[in-house]
Amino acid sequence: MTTPFPDTYAAGVRLPSRELPREVVVWLEGELGGRVVHHDDKRGGFSPGVASVITVESGRRAFVKAVGASINPDAIGFMRAEAAQAVRLPDLPGLLRPLVTADLVADGDEWCVALFPVIDGRPPHHPWRPDEARRVLDTVDELTSSLTPSPWPDDPGRDDKYDVFFRGWSRIAAHPDDPWHGNPWVATHLDRLVALEGAGRAALRGDTLSQRDLRADNILLTDDTVWIVDWAHAGNTARWFDGLVLLADVVASRADIGDGGALDVAELLRTHPAVATADEPVQWGIIAGLAATLHRFAQAAAPPGLPTIRTWQGQTAEDILRFVIRALPATL
């Protein structure tokens, strides 16, 4: 991305790769067969660890992701999940699998490290552009067809985690001091939103392997391929789930026509095959549910090493809520 990141884009504060512990650097250089001579740190996402393209003396390059437990104990858990699950991904166009992964100890601190092939691509623009949004949605539709039935029939039932995740409106209803009770539209429609939340939760289960965290910062575009990366939260859900999460990011980027953008997101919900198979109450239950849950998350203290995440969650929640207020069908 050649322009500064807008405030809608998920971009936290990462550790520069030049600051990796010596033990980790020695491992990287051993795997790549030479001394690291160039670092190209990347942004996007909220992990406080390293995300960088490194080059060794021979010219060989690799994309390295790494995080230490002392930086954030939850982040190393997500990194381990990403490494373990990326290895299991089927060999399909656009799915990025690691070259090698390792758990290391450096100065008494646990580190998870993974090397990936370098993809010379770029993230989609924020606000999303119509051609890029449709291209990625088309890819999601094709990919979910290839991933249904799921190649992971032993998925450990993590749908339950998402059933809990999509209870934001119920939590708001149970807390009269929540700031959104002061929003007149929310106050008037809260029972309706809780009911839609229930419709979305009831339909979550499915037999499609889904990335489940699909935003612009987890996508790379090349001339011929849409790459979907970071499968740390992957699991089996309904096949329309990734498309709906993606459209929530489109809305949060302020690309919808109601925000002055060039995309009619409500029309995409009705017509695009990546999402149109979901019933209308389910679609709006998931999208409105994302707003409510992110709103609740935003009120907590920032986790260690992630100073920007709560601001981003709060702004994303407000952007999605604004879309729901103006576009939610009156028949629901």
Image (cartoon, rainbow, N blue to C red):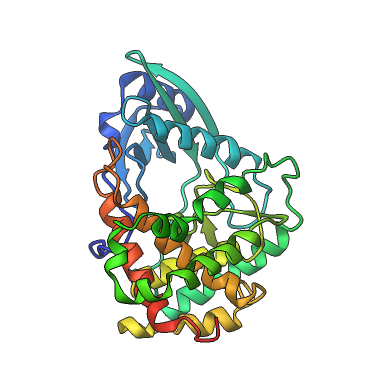
Residue 267, x across and y down, in percent: 52, 85
Instruction: Give the residue drawn at x 49%, y 58%.
Output: 214
**Looking at the figure, which quarter contains the N terminus?**
bottom left
Q: In this view, does 40 lie to the left or right of 283?
A: left
Quarter the C terminus occupies: bottom right
Corner quadrant of residue 97: top right
Q: Residue at x 43, y 31 (%)?
A: 76
72 is higher (above) or lower (below) than 157: above
Can the viewer see residue 222 in this picture? Answer: no
Residue 91 shows in the view: yes
Residue at screen point 30% across, 35% down: 17
From the viewer's perspective, is residue 217 above or below residue 82?
Answer: below
Q: Position of residue 239 (x, y in %)?
A: 66, 63
Along the viewing direction, whichever of 17 and 49 lies nearer the viewer? 49
For the residue pair 6 and 323, the one nearer the viewer reads as 323
Residue 217 location (% of width, % of height)? 40, 56
Please tell me which residue is depicted at 52% across the width and 72% down the height of the picture: 284
Asked where in the image residue 14 lies, by quadrant, the reply is top left
Residue 308 horizontal/vertical position (percent)? 25, 49
